[in-house]
Image (cartoon, rainbow, N blue to C red):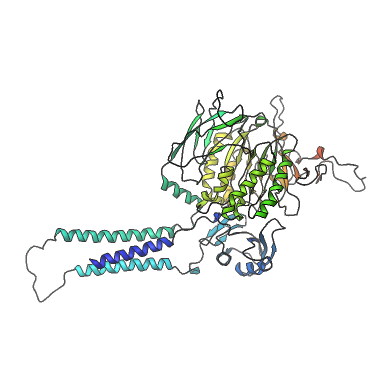
């Protein structure tokens, strides 16, 4: 009896010891200790670019360091430079080359030696997250390392614990068996019955053994699920919660633009509300009830799909209040209202928009905040002076949250919002999440936790709204797109509800169709979008100003250059023109015969100067006299030739008042 109890206790203690040390780490997105690696394979050679923080390795040693740790079927060669002057402040950039076709890379040594918890890897266009759990990367994804990479001490301890329990159980069983005594004949008669006390003891012993076995099985769960994706984490969390909360409010016509429903302000029926997963629609009295899963994100948000001709009331930093935080607790949560302001500009199909990207305001240090705040404020002032512009949108990397230590992350968003306020943008500013905007608190976990500071300050990572008679969709495509199944499910419902019969404009951070994009994991999203009339896809991330024919019928793809042009050029922004895709209902003609066009401007360049490359009629032939003047305001637009645009822009216009 006592040996059995002791053995069970020892086994359970050992199992809990194993489980305690086997807790899976929080998402690597919440840590600043990460690297970025791009690998591009050709027939017989492979090239790569590695970016790490300067605290990991110095520029002069980075080439040899990376070459030693990133060997494949052939050795690598590398050369490192400081990233401060090349678009990676505080980083080191290593150019890599292998003289063979690299099928896969094992990043175990690099992660260990560099003290890294994650490497974001783009392998032949597919973006994946490599961690110590899944350090081997190839074009199909991230995988577990070789079994011999580390001694499986947890498995050994678990096996020893189970063996102790099993041996003690066997020992007890053998002791309880009647001993064979051949020199004493067995007495005839009925088998003696066990006492109630002995029956109870036997039952308790069996229960103890069953409990030990169940604990052993439970101990195997973390190992069986190691390396699961963000999407899987969300599914498990939702299943564990199993208790949706009720969110209630009203959408109303905010005539006086104060964000509060005053007497006489009418309700708005038929307006959709979502939390990024589930949907509801306001009734005849403008009210809605949404039942949402509070475990889906750390900061719970609900957002409205603002209808055509309306703009949600603006915050002081000009960000539309299309989203609201849901209080903590079981609910029901009431009074979460959406103030929608009637806006003639929002109904104008030729409204002029400004668009920028990769602003990268920083609070990684006090010096970085002092430098980037006035720079960003001046850029906001420049955009505010664009004649006739009444809408602004950014395509990601608004901050450098991922490189900031956790206590400094909120202040980075404070810098961003202060620049919008002090620069007096004067128009709605819609955000998009970029890879550098990702990062959570010290206790954040999983994909949802990695979006924590962004959600607190700028809203949901995917959302949509109607404007100018078109449907606008903002997506998140920064990391492993194959793990964004919840976004795809939301998108399907959003397009079904709002995109039929409308032109669709799409915004995200990474370009869908370049080697810097999110990779093949986005194909289901592209397939869904292809069912609708997508006219533009706009992105950033590449640090290049690009304009080309898009993959969708009648569409273009526009890339914003951002703060760090890879060719050393100035930060840029775009002025979007929708005239050539706008049909005038007052005529019998079809004026929707062209493409979205744009003016490309650079900050800190005098707006009286322009460079065309080449604009229609601007080719300077051999022997022709020098042109006497340049009139940029009459040639300042990207206009692809009709009816089929070429892959390059026809004009580039630079200009903005120096801040």
**Residue at the farthest left position:** 188
Q: Residue drawn 22% across and 66% down?
A: 1
Tell me residue 300's x, y (percent).
50, 42
Tell me residue 392's x, y (percent).
67, 39
Q: Is residue 2 left or right of residue 244?
A: left
Q: Is residue 288 left or right of residue 631?
A: left
**Residue at the farthest top position:** 264
Q: Is residue 140 visible?
A: no
Screen quadrant of the C terminus: top right
In depth, the one of 641 and 409 nearer the eye is 409
In depth, the one of 446 and 13 nearer the eye is 13
Quadrant of the rendered structure where residue 35 is?
bottom right
Q: Residue drawn 32% across and 66% down?
A: 10
In depth, the one of 296 and 248 nearer the eye is 248
Question: Is 388 located above or below residue 485 in the figure?
Answer: above
Tell me residue 599's x, y (percent).
75, 41
């Amino acid at each position: 009896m006592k040996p059995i109890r002791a053995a069970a206790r020892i086994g359970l203690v050992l199992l809990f010891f194993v489980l305690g040390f086997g807790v899976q780490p929080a998402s690597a997105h919440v840590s600043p200790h990460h690297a970025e690696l791009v690998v591009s394979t050709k027939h017989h050679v492979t090239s790569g670019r590695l970016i790490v923080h300067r605290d990991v390795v110095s520029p002069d040693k980075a080439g040899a360091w990376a070459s030693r740790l990133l060997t494949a079927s052939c050795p690598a060669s590398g050369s490192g430079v400081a990233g401060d002057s090349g678009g990676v402040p505080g980083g080191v950039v290593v150019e890599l080359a292998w003289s063979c076709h690299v099928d896969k890379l094992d990043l175990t040594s690099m992660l260990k030696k560099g003290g890294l918890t994650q490497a974001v890897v783009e392998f032949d266009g597919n973006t994946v997250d490599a961690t110590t759990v899944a350090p081997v990367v190839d074009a199909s994804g991230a995988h577990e390392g070789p079994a011999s990479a580390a001694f499986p001490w947890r498995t050994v301890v678990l096996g020893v614990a189970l063996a102790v329990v099993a041996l003690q159980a066997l020992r007890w069983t053998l002791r309880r068996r009647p001993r064979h005594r051949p020199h004493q004949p067995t007495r005839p008669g009925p088998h003696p019955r066990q006492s109630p006390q002995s029956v109870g003891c036997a039952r308790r012993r069996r229960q103890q053994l069953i409990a030990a076995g169940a604990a052993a099985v439970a101990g195997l769960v973390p190992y069986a699920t190691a390396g699961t994706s963000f999407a899987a984490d969300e599914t498990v969390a939702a299943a564990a919660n199993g208790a949706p909360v009720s969110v209630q409010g009203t959408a109303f016509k905010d005539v006086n633009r104060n964000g509060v429903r005053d007497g006489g302000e009418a309700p708005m029926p038929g307006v959709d509300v979502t939390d990024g997963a589930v949907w509801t629609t306001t009734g005849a009295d403008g009210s809605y009830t949404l039942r949402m899963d509070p475990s889906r994100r750390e900061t719970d948000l609900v957002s409205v799909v603002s209808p055509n001709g309306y703009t949600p009331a603006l915050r002081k930093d000009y960000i539309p209040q299309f989203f609201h935080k849901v209080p903590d607790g079981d609910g029901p949560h009431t009074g979460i209202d959406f103030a929608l302001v009637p806006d003639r500009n929002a109904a104008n199909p030729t409204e002029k928009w400004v668009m920028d990207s990769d602003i990268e305001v920083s609070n990684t240090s006090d010096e970085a905040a002092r430098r980037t705040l006035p720079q960003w404020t001046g850029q906001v002032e420049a955009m505010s002076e664009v004649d006739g512009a009444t809408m602004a949108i950014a395509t990601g990397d608004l901050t450098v949250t991922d490189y900031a230590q956790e206590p400094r992350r909120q202040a980075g968003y404070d810098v961003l919002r202060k620049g919008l306020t002090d620069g007096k943008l004067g128009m709605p500013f819609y955000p998009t999440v970029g890879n550098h905007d990702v990062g959570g608190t010290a206790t954040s976990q999983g994909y949802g936790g990695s979006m924590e500071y962004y959600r607190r300050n700028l809203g949901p990572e995917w959302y949509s709204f109607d404007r100018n008679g078109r449907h606008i969709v903002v997506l998140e495509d920064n990391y492993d797109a194959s793990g964004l199944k919840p976004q795809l499910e939301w998108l399907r419902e959003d397009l079904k509800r709002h995109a039929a019969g409308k032109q669709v404009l799409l915004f995200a951070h990474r370009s869908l169709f370049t080697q810097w994009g999110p990779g093949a994991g986005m194909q289901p999203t592209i397939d869904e979008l292809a069912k609708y009339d997508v006219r533009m896809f706009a992105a950033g991330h590449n640090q290049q100003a690009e304009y080309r024919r898009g993959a969708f019928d009648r569409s273009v793809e526009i890339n914003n250059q951002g703060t760090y042009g890879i060719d050393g050029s100035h930060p840029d922004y775009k002025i979007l023109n929708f005239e050539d895709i706008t049909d005038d209902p007052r005529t019998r003609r079809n004026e929707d015969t062209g493409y979205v066009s744009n003016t490309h401007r650079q900050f800190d360049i005098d707006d009286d100067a322009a460079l065309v490359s080449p604009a229609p009629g601007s080719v300077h032939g051999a022997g022709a006299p020098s042109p006497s003047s340049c009139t940029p305001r009459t040639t300042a637009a990207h206009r692809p030739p009709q009816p089929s645009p070429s892959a390059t822009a026809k004009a580039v216009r630079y200009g903005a008042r120096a801040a």
